């Protein structure tokens, strides 16, 4: 085989190696490590599959300034979400704005309980 073909063969191996590394980074590493891409590329974030679902729901509630979104966090952490929401945003809880009756009762129990 002439010497110039070895250069092309070496170049092809390098190109394939770089392509494999970029493919792994784009599809393998990002998926395992939780690295987020651009919002349009990855789609909407689901809190059920997030690494920290509680923080995801709390972030959504604070961003929308809607304590009703704390109802999605699950029964065990609703009260924690309400307390965190009020403390972080430095607002008083308005339990009358909550639509779910059971969640409204939990909220009112928090508000009337002395700290």
Image (tube, grey):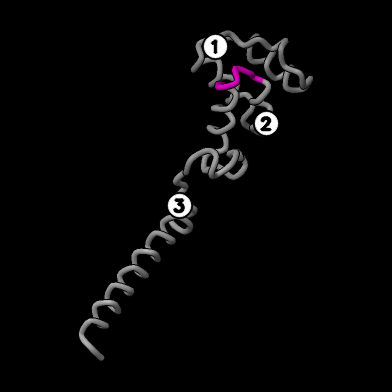
Distance in Å between CA atoms under marks 3 and 2: 27 Å
Q: Secondary structure at mark 1?
A: loop
On the picture, is 107 further left or further right than 11? Answer: right
Q: Tell me which corner region of the image, top left, top right, bottom left or bottom right, holds residue 61.
A: top right
Residue 49 versus residue 30: which sits nearer the camera?
Answer: 30
Distance in Å between CA atoms under marks 2 and 1: 25 Å
List the residue tagged with mark 3: 30
Q: Which residues are magenta?
A: 62-67
Which numbered marker is on residue 115?
Answer: 1
In this picture, is 37 found above or below 87?
A: below
Q: Residue at x 37, y 62 (%)?
A: 21
Q: Residue at x 59, y 31 (%)?
A: 57
Q: Position of residue 103 (x, y in %)?
A: 72, 22
Which quadrant would the C terminus be assigned to in this image? top right
List the residue tagged with mark 2: 72
Q: Is residue 66 magenta?
A: yes
Residue 68 versus residue 64: which sits nearer the camera?
Answer: 64
In this picture, is 91 found above or below 53?
A: above
Q: Secondary structure at mark 2?
A: helix
| Dot 3 and dot 1 residues touching (CB under 8 Å) | no
Give the residue at the far left of this rendering.
Answer: 3
Residue 100 versus residue 9: which sits nearer the camera?
Answer: 9
Q: Residues within 10 Å of mark 1 (few under 14, many from 20)?
A: few
Which quadrant would the N terminus be assigned to in this image? bottom left
Q: Position of residue 59 (x, y in %)?
A: 54, 27
In this picture, is 18 found above or below 1?
A: above
In this picture, is 11 found above or below 49?
A: below
Q: Tell me which corner region of the image, top left, top right, bottom left or bottom right, holds residue 102.
A: top right
Which numbered marker is on residue 10?
Answer: none
Q: Secondary structure at mark 3?
A: helix
Residue 19 versus residue 49: which sits nearer the camera?
Answer: 19
């Amino acid at each position: 085989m002439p010497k110039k073909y070895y250069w092309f063969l070496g170049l092809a191996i390098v190109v394939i190696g770089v392509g494999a590394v970029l493919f792994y980074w784009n599809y393998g590493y990002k998926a395992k490590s939780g690295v987020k891409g651009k919002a349009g590329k990855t789609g909407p974030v689901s809190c059920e599959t997030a690494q920290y679902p509680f923080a995801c729901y709390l972030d959504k509630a604070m961003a929308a300034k809607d304590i009703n979104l704390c109802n999605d966090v699950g029964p065990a952490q609703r009260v924690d979400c309400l307390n965190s929401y009020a403390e972080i945003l430095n607002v008083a809880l308005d339990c009358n704005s909550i639509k779910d009756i059971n969640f409204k009762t939990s909220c009112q129990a928090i508000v009337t309980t002395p700290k």
